[in-house]
Every structure is written in structure tokens, then in C-alpha cells.
Image: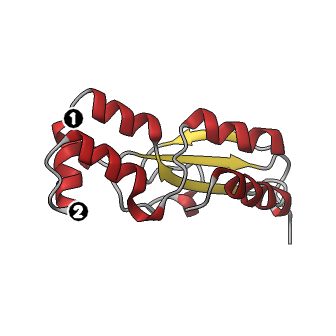
Amino acid sequence: HLPFQAGKRLLAECARVLKPGGTIRLATPDLTGLARAYLDRSERSLAWYRKQFGGITTYAQMFNTGMRAWGHQFLYDEEALRSVLEPQGLEVSRVGYNESPDPELRGLEFRDTAEGAQSMYIEARRPGAAAVN
């Protein structure tokens, strides 16, 4: 929902305040997945967008809606998101829909890629032992 530079600043601040051993989970549209759905003419994705927004009849409408829906101003692919997070000293991994090594970060999403959504789920961890209280 932010332009690239504002998102970069926000993620830098998140990284700054993340405790050693802490993890931030990001769920965001996946530009690569959206482009692939457009180029491959994914019927499943077109049906998902039609269900979400109504009136979507072409792949161009699907792609443009995907780029602008929900107020997004910049869509990341994995490379772009890593390019922001890794220089902050975070260990980045891509995880699946509602999956995580951390039980508290599982089951949080509602836009299922199996149904046709183009989302990616990234976890970025601050190296080091978790703080003991």
C-alpha cells in the first residue's frame, strides 16, 4: 500500500526494532505469480479475480486489477523484497500459504494461492538467540 521508497523505509524500521531471534512475516501480492497467471492464461486465476471483483472477463483486466486492487502502489517479486530485507541483516525465506517454522505464524492468511490468488509469504528473521524474559 506504499510506494517503493516508503515501503523500503518501513521495512528498514521493522528490521531495526526486531529483536534477535525475532521474525517478521510478510504476506503480499506476488508480481511474478500475477505475471505468470497472465502469460499462462490461468483459468483458475481469472475465475478467482472474477469471484473477488465481478466483471473481470479478460486477462488484461485480471492483471490490471491485480496491480491496483486493495490500494497497492508497488508489487514486489521475491527478488525485490529480498533486496530490501537482506541488506538489513535479516535471514529471508519464502514459506507457503499458512505455513511457518514458527507455530504462532501459521494459519494467518486468507488469500489462498491454490484458489488462484497470487500471493507470496516471506519470513525475515533477525539472527541470534531469542531474548529470554
Q: Which of pointers 2 and 1 lies earlier in the amino acid sequence?
A: 1
Q: Is residue 126 left or right of residue 40?
A: right
The x, y position of residue 118, in whole percent, is 37, 45
Closest to the camera, between mark 2 and mark 1, is 2
Colouring: secondary structure
| Rendered location of residue 12, percent (x, y) | 79, 54
Q: Is residue 24 left or right of residue 99?
A: right
Count of numbered marks: 2
Q: Give the SS element for disc 1.
A: loop
Identify the mark at residue 42; answer none if there is no mark: 1
Foreground of the two, 19 or 42: 42
Residue count near mark 1 (Cα–Cα under 10 Å), binned few <14, some 14–19, many ≥20: some
Quarter the N terminus occupies: bottom right
Residue sitting farthest toward the top: 40
Image coordinates of residue 30 in percent, x first then y, are 46, 43
Q: Is residue 113 above or below residue 39?
A: below
Return the residue nearer the eye: 29 or 70: 70
The alpha-carbon separation of the residues under discs 2 and 1 comes to 17 Å
Percent of width and height locating residue 111: 35, 57
Q: Which mark is residue 53?
A: 2
Task: Identify residue type, mark 1.
Answer: Ser
- Horizontal side of 84 relative to 77 (left or right) equals right
Q: Nearer the viewer, residue 94 or 104?
A: 94
**In the image, what residue occupies the spot 57% across and 63% down?**
104
Q: Residue at x 46, y 40 (%)?
A: 31
Residue at left 63%, top 42%? Answer: 81
Element under disc 2? helix
Displayed quadrant of residue 44: top left
Work out whether residue 81 or residue 72 is closer to the camera in this orientation and state it: 72
Instruction: Name which residue lies at 83% across and 63% down.
Output: 17
* Residue type at numbered disc 2: Phe
